[in-house]
DNA sequence: ACAATGGTCC
DNA sequence: ACTCGGACCATTGTA
């Protein structure tokens, strides 16, 4: 049933007759698959998940895809001109500093210049040579001006080609709305994915990135209402681990990164610096991913010993977390799979691998999948509830984006207040865990400023 | 067409 | 020897 890579737009070229046959074949195939797989879903205990979540979600996603999201074409065009100009200038500057012209986009050619001609210290090796990734270039920035220029160039080139250019061309046709595909199959954890274009990795970190975000707007007379779950992964983690300190922190609505920082640095919460909090935040995320002391050390740029101390103190504070990790790995070894709160299942055959790297990877996956997958379960339920309530209450607002822990709605100005309440309530109360779910709301004309 | 590298998001 | 979970995509360079 796979179409050719360039065949997805076939309906634009063929007549209705052929399109009809083609569509019916698709439907027939889907039905045949359904009849074959229904018993399997039953046996695996997945029927309920299919019938009550994934199935009902199909029309919701289909409508999101059809409606799309509006972008400001003029704004994008201006960004394209400005970024192209700046890239051209950077390019010339780079040639001058490097002493010759080369293809800046080629990591190979760049490596030649940096490590052969300029004789800068080499870093990590790749399969084909020496790495020129952001970590390496940042380290070299203090010794030579070229690496810093490359970083600037890469940053701008990435934004221009992947986002500005791509989004412009997609928005050029039709009403300026961009129609992504939200895929239900294809992730190992149960998350959605977005493609053609991917609207789940629109920039947000850098100032230039935020300007690209600003090009995503609400149509005339509407506002964008966004709700994002506050630290849903860690909250799910608290729920699963039943760790009392973590549960207490979220129940009291404490700043959990600050609390962690206070503990591992042995200072009063009031004396936690932003740097200490940053370290604690990295650890909190690392824990969810099953990070080792080695991984933590390389992430934080500290010694393994220091990293190990952080981890020891972490497990001191959150004793339940360690037990949970051990138990979920045991479970994976026993069953050969792990599950999410709604029974979504991920096989982990490599949990018994004799290859240590593979086995440990499977162990980290055993920890991460129930967390990430349960968070995905929760927001999928929220999407169904939001969609249902919008209809029941006859609101005109519609969901247009999902970004893993965030839902964005396009809402008529007059309904913003009521819809915001609806969104907040539906997201926070869609499921009851051992800790409350908390949602931050944002109302704006575009996706840029303040988010 | 495909692998490798690098980079964006949660 | 060990380098954090999940995605998608652009570009280069080789086949």
Image (tube, coloured by chain):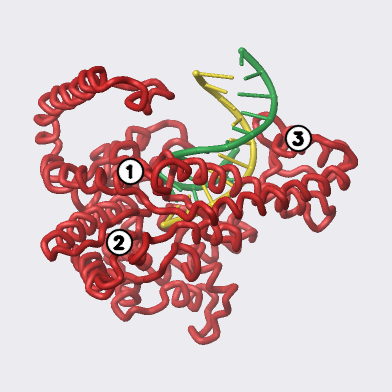
Chain colours: A red, B yellow, C green
Residue A315 coordinates in the image, percent (x, y): 42, 65
Numbered badge on residue A236: 2
Q: Is mark 2 on a helix, strand or loop?
A: helix
Q: Which chain carries label 3?
A: A
Residue at left offset 37%, top offset 65%: A231
Give the SS element for disc 1.
strand
Does residue C14 lie above or below A182 as drawn? Answer: above
Alpha carbon of mark 3 to alpha carbon of mark 1: how far? 35 Å
Q: Nearer the viewer, residue A160 or A292?
A: A160
Q: Which residue lies furthest to the right in this view?
A: A99
Residue A190 visible (yes or no): no
Sequence-earlier tag: 2 or 3: 3
* x 41%, y 72%: residue: A317
Residue at the spot 18% in from the left edge and 26% down from the top edge: A27
> To which residue does mark 3 refer?
A103
Q: Is residue A275 visible?
A: yes
**Discs 2 and 3 lie in a common subunit:** yes
């Amino acid at each position: 049933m796979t179409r050719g890579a360039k065949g997805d737009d076939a309906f634009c070229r063929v007549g209705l007759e052929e399109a009809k046959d083609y569509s019916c074949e698709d439907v027939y195939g889907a039905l045949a698959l359904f009849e074959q797989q229904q018993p399997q879903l039953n046996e695996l205990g997945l029927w309920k998940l299919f019938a009550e979540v994934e199935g009902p979600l199909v029309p919701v996603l289909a409508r999101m895809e059809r409606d799309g999201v509006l972008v400001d074409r003029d704004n994008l065009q201006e960004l394209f001109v400005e970024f192209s100009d700046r890239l051209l200038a950077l390019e010339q500057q780079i040639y001058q500093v490097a002493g010759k012209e080369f293809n800046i986009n080629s990591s190979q050619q760049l490596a030649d210049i940096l490590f052969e001609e300029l004789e800068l210290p080499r870093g990590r090796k790749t399969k084909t040579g020496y790495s020129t990734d952001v970590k390496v270039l940042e380290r070299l920035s203090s010794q030579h001006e070229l690496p810093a220029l490359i970083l600037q160039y890469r940053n701008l080139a990435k934004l221009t080609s992947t986002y500005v250019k791509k989004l412009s061309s997609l928005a050029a046709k039709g009403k300026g709305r961009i129609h992504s595909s939200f895929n239900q199959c294809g992730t190992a954890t149960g998350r959605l994915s977005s493609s053609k274009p991917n609207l789940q990795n629109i920039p947000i970190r850098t100032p230039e990135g935020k300007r690209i975000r600003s090009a995503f707007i609400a149509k005339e007379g509407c506002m964008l209402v966004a709700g994002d779950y506050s630290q849903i992964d860690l909250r799910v983690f608290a729920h699963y681990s039943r760790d009392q300190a973590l549960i207490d922190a979220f129940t009291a609505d404490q700043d959990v990164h600050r609390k962690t920082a206070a503990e591992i640095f042995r200072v009063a919460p009031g004396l936690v610096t932003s740097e200490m909090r940053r370290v604690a935040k990295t650890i909190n995320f690392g824990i969810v991913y099953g990070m080792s002391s080695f991984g933590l050390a390389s992430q934080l740029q500290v010694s393994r010993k220091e990293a190990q101390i952080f981890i020891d103190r972490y497990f001191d504070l959150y004793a339940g977390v360690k037990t949970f990790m051990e138990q979920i790995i045991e479970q994976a070894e026993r069953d050969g799979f792990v599950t999410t709160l709604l029974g979504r299942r991920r096989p982990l055959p490599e949990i018994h691998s004799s290859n240590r790297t593979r086995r440990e990877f499977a162990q980290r996956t055993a920890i991460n999948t129930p967390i990430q997958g349960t968070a995905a379960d929760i927001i999928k339920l929220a999407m169904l509830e939001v969609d249902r309530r919008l209809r029941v209450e006859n609101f005109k607002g519609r969901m247009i984006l999902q970004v893993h822990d965030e839902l964005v709605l396009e809402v008529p100005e007059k309904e913003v207040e009521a819809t915001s309440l609806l969104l907040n309530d539906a997201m926070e109360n869609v499921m009851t865990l051992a800790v409350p779910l908390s949602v931050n709301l944002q109302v704006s004309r575009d996706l840029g400023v303040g988010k």
